[in-house]
Image: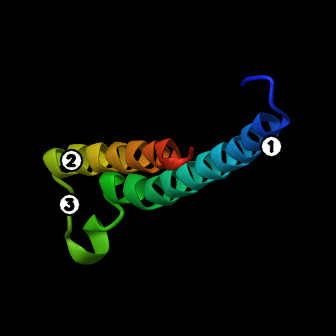
Amino acid sequence: MKNDLNDVVKAITFSHKTLRNIKQNLFWAFFYNIIGIPVAAGVLFLPFGITLSPMIGAAAMSLSSLFVVTNALRLYKMK
């Protein structure tokens, strides 16, 4: 920030966008975990005989992290 009052407005706007981004990341992380953890634990095995390979689980977790980081990087577009 410099000696300009407009910078205060920009800082407040940036903080609102940052909080919105954090809430989005938390929502998608919870959504992913609500679905992913039971599937990884084997809930689908008895009714459908479906199991989750650890390799697929690791890839899904990596993709989840990639999406969170990509979402957070959108804040760089703000000037």
Q: Residues within 10 Å of mark 2 (few under 14, many from 20)?
A: few
In the displayed structure, does residue 4 sit left or right of residue 55? right
Type of amino acid under label 1: Val
Give the labeled residue for mark 2: 59
Give the labeled residue for mark 3: 51
x, y percentage for residue 56?
18, 52
Query: What residue is drawn where x is 85% and y is 35%?
Result: 5
Which tag, 1 or 3, sits closer to the chain's start? 1
Query: What residue is drawn where x is 55% and y is 47%?
Result: 78
Q: In front: mark 1 or mark 2?
A: 1
Type of amino acid under label 2: Ala
Vertical comparison of 3 with 9: above or below: above
User: Please, what secondary structure does the residue beneath circle 2 have?
Assistant: helix
Type of amino acid under label 3: Thr
The alpha-carbon separation of the residues under discs 1 and 3 comes to: 52 Å
x, y percentage for residue 40?
31, 53
